[in-house]
Amino acid sequence: MAVPLHSPEAEHAHDLALARKDILRIATAGSVDDGKSTLIGRLLYDSKAIYEDQYEAVERASKGDYVDLALLTDGLRAEREQGITIDVAYRYFSTPRRTFILADTPGHVQYTRNMVTGASTADLAIVLVDARKGMLEQSRRHTFLASLLRVPHLVVAVNKMDLVDWSEDVYEGIRDEFTAFATKLNIPDLTVVPVSALHGDNVVTRSDRSPWYQGSSLLHHLEHVHVASDRNLVDVRFPVQYVVRPQSDAFHDYRGYAGTVASGVLRPGDEVQVLPSGLTTTIAAIDGPRGPVAEAFAPMAVTVRLTDDLDVSRGDLICRPANAPHPAQDLDAMVSWMTEEPLRPRQRLTVKHTTRTVRAMVKDVQYRLDVNSLHRDLTAGELGLNDIGRVRLRTTQPLFVDDYARNRVTGRFILIDEATNATVGAGMLTPAG
Amino acid sequence: MPDTVRGILPEPVRLVLVQVLSPTSGAERVPTPDYRLSQLETLEAESIHVIREVAAELERPVLLFSGGKDSIVMLELARKAFAPARIPFPVMHVDTGLNFPDVLEFRDKRVAELGVQLIVASVPDAIAAGTVKEEPNGSRNRIQTPVLLDAVEEHGFTALFGGARRDEDKARAKERVFSFRDEFGQWDPKNQRPELWDLYNGRIHLGESIRVFPLSNWTELDIWQYVLREEIEIPALYLAQEREVVERQGMLYAVNEFIRPKDGEQVRRETVRYRTVGDANLTAAVLSEATTVEEVIAEIAVTRMTERGATRGDDKVSDAAMEDRKKEGYF
Ligand SMILES: Nc1nc2c(ncn2[C@@H]2O[C@H](COP(=O)(O)OP(=O)(O)O)[C@@H](O)[C@H]2O)c(=O)[nH]1
């Protein structure tokens, strides 16, 4: 039967579908069996990102009294059983307020690499813990990785509260432990929610079973968490990605610099500096996807036109003369290493930073960090697969960098193996010293 | 019924969007109070970034264009990425020879408007030349692949833009935006590069290539909303129209060049639309009243919202009823 389009439900559904929303990117972390698949299945199901046929398939496959929502995300589980490489899987769901992109990183040995990948773009990380087990070593690792990647918001979902009789004491114990740890790590925003993913308590709506809990449900928190102030609107950074030259009669003199705004706000008339040349000029116009715009901010993809005819190419950076990033050839960074072959001093690598790619040599592995205890091993000398440590690199040409803590875009880079072309590491710049 | 249709932006929505989106002259300051992009603007920016990155880093990209809605949106994003210049790479259509005529017409028109080069990799030609063999069931889905790979080799393409989305199925959920293929065009799931931030690594060795999926993070509803908002033309097949259909295994097939009623099959008239435009001999239509893009969106949205209620026998799922059930533990 055709869907009736003129019922109140249809109009409601239509309005919701067309409402203006923003996107929240989420990374999830949890150890095996903490209930991550169940929780994600619950969020997908309750936000109706699951089609009925998928749901029925899950219903048929479930054994026991409950529909096993974990089966909705079992693509990765199958792989886990077969021992195939597991990495990040992306899920999509939305509510009337927001659209969510969830990077699901299953917990296992490759965990660090995958979680770093998933968390790299996240606005918010959900760390799952089993209420019966409390804060484990893995929970510390997940929390640390979220803080290393500067994910601005952290949510700890204390799951399986039904198995501890919804004990307020259990919840408070876990909450206090996390709060203390988060303070050490400078995590700006921590929220701890007691949930039962299996039964749905405090996932979408607040549950009667936790009258002592004053906070909001998990989904309510995801919908309302304030992310507008997470971005850097102060430091103008525009890496030139592509030079647009139509060479057509209609646009004979057009020369635009296309790219994605990294931070700050750009406006026509602004005085700007182009690096590395250091020349200054003015923004003549900014073209967005629908023609000229009055302002450009992150993460808009625009084309900037300048009043002067300068020689600007891919890899250059446009900023404000009074607020330029410093040129650096010595990079101090926390590096997450992602390949078997260890990272060692004197190794040659390619660094991709914004739109600029340069060659580099490893000068020094200053320490390797034990991601569980946060202990620094100064004698390590190298980084193995899934290790994180502080590394100094020397590049053949200067890069225009900011500290990752200040600017998540100009403070990051990837490392590429020159022989295999594989991406072998991720770096987050830290102040020297 | 026109060959192509345009989405009509409803007034109330336009009012909301206008604040940030409407094209404005350089002099005019439009208030963007919180400096936030909507989901469509964010996805659009992300896709444009990916497309530009490939054009900047890879020698010979090509965009796979089928005339379906996803590839239409992808082509539109490519246009925006380089405007006012032309798209700096050709588009390629793997022609199975089983196309809806509307779709081919649409393809040619769109390509001409954009002034891009169209390369057609023809499956019938490959069958005639004996490089591939027709499958018994009449589907040319599988035999498209060698035809595509031959064309890639012949033209020396190093990057192929495809319109696939991660929300399509579970297996695609973990696909990278940049997906690596060895010199045989094969995908090795164990050997994919980690993708961090928006720092894509487009380095390849001679003979290797990359499939690039700029629409990875779009959902089906996002695509439709974008078609509506940007007033993007789509083939008329996507909208409901009265057609002659035959029913086969519970599915409705419009009678066309490739689908002829068999003995004993009743031809009847139904109002139907297509959800995808694949091969005309195998693609079924669905009953629908949606004659505008907006109505298609409403239809998709309402299907999701009420399907559970409908199949569960409780007539309407009011918010309160839903609430109660959740409190009870649900299920
Ligand atoms: N009692 C109870 N069991 C749960 C809860 N959440 C998950 N489980 C169960 O814990 C087991 C592991 O859950 P799963 O989602 O597969 O964990 P994952 O490995 O973290 O994805 C399954 O048997 C679930 O049914 C919960 O809130 N309460």
Image (cartoon, helix red, strand yellow):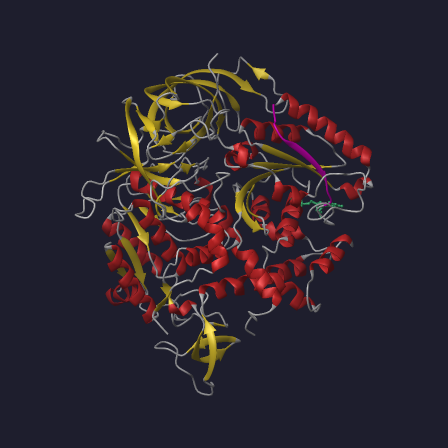
Query: What residue sits 65% from the left and 23% below the top?
Result: A183
Q: Is residue A375 above or below residue A94?
A: above
- Nearer to us in this view, A67 or B20: B20
Q: Is residue B291 above or below residue B223?
A: below
Point out the stretch of residues depicted in magenta.
A186-196
- The quarter in which the N terminus of chain B is drawn is bottom left
Quarter of the picture holding the C terminus of chain B = bottom right
In the rendered structure, the answer to whether residue A209 lies left or right of residue B286 reads right
Say whether residue A195 is magenta: yes
Name which residue lies at 67% across and 59% down. Answer: A59
Q: Quarter of the picture for ligand 1?
A: top right
Identify the residue at image location x=62%, y=42%: A224
Counting from the top left corner in percent of width and height, residue A27 is at 57, 39
Toward which corner of the image does residue A332 lie, by quadrant?
A: top left
Say above or below: A47 vs A170.
below
Q: Is residue B205 visible?
A: no
A216 inside magenta stretch? no
Image location of residue A102, percent across then percent down: 56, 44
Evaluate whether residue B293 shows in this view. Answer: yes
From the viewer's side, name the closer residue of B169 and A27.
A27
